[in-house]
Image (cartoon, helix red, strand yellow):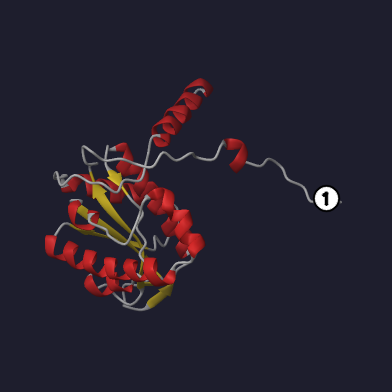
Amino acid sequence: MAPEASLAAGRDLYAELDRRRSVRHFSADPVPREYIELAIATASTAPSGAHMQPWTFVAIDDPELKQQIRIAAEAEERASYEQRMSEEWLRALAPLGTDWRKPYLETAPYLVVVFEQTTGVDALGQRRKHYYVRESVGIACGIFITALHHMGLCTLTHTPNPMGFLSQILARPSNERPYILFPVGYAAEDAVVPDLRRKSLDEVRVWNPRASR
């Protein structure tokens, strides 16, 4: 690419992603399955340790499964908000207006649960080591979020703690652990998001630091 075109493309992508917001108010309007498949395929272009691609994207649109997940997630979230979280943590969450109730887990047309594969299984059924699993899966999830936003869809990174109930409900094998739960769909017409400020470039970028001598 010519330098001017390269810089313009970078600025366009920044402007697009700077408009991205996490959404907690979803429309129940249907979304074609092809959109979800395409976002997952895009996420799977992510680099990974030794090219093991240690992720599984489990897509759910079955109302019964979504209801089971919501009930289990809200039970854990309620315990967290009422017993586990420190006062400092609760104060940090206060500007977001969140609580243990998660109706979007049923309202959003899709839930996509990303599992990290702690080990792989080869053609003979033998376990094989995976490398840099958390880093690889995190990069894939970032690309997944970007793909959804690029198609006009919204999502939220939901991480109830603990998340073992997802393995049980979704009958995942023992070499997989839940990583992030994404509700996916269009924003509701009356959706609102917190007016948050992102850190400036100067706050997140450091050039050539040197230790003092």
Q: At x 29% / y 75%, what residue is drawn?
A: 173
The image quadrant of residue 53 is: bottom left
50 and 182: which is toward the camera = 182
Determine which quarter of the picture holds residue 201: top right
The residue type indicated by label 1 comes to Ser
The image shows residue 200 at horizontal and vertical percentages of: 56, 36
Number of marks in the image? 1
- Viewed as shown, does residue 8 lie left or right of 59? right
The answer to whether residue 150 is above or below residue 177 is above
Task: Give the camera-side residue of 189 and 212.
Answer: 189
- 207 relative to 88, above or below: above
Residue 49 located left or right of residue 111: right
Farthest residue toward the top? 4
**Location of residue 70 with respect to 28 vertically, above or below:** below
| Place of residue 156 in the rendered image (x, y in percent of width and height, measured from the top left) | 33, 51
State which quadrant residue 73 falls in. Answer: bottom left
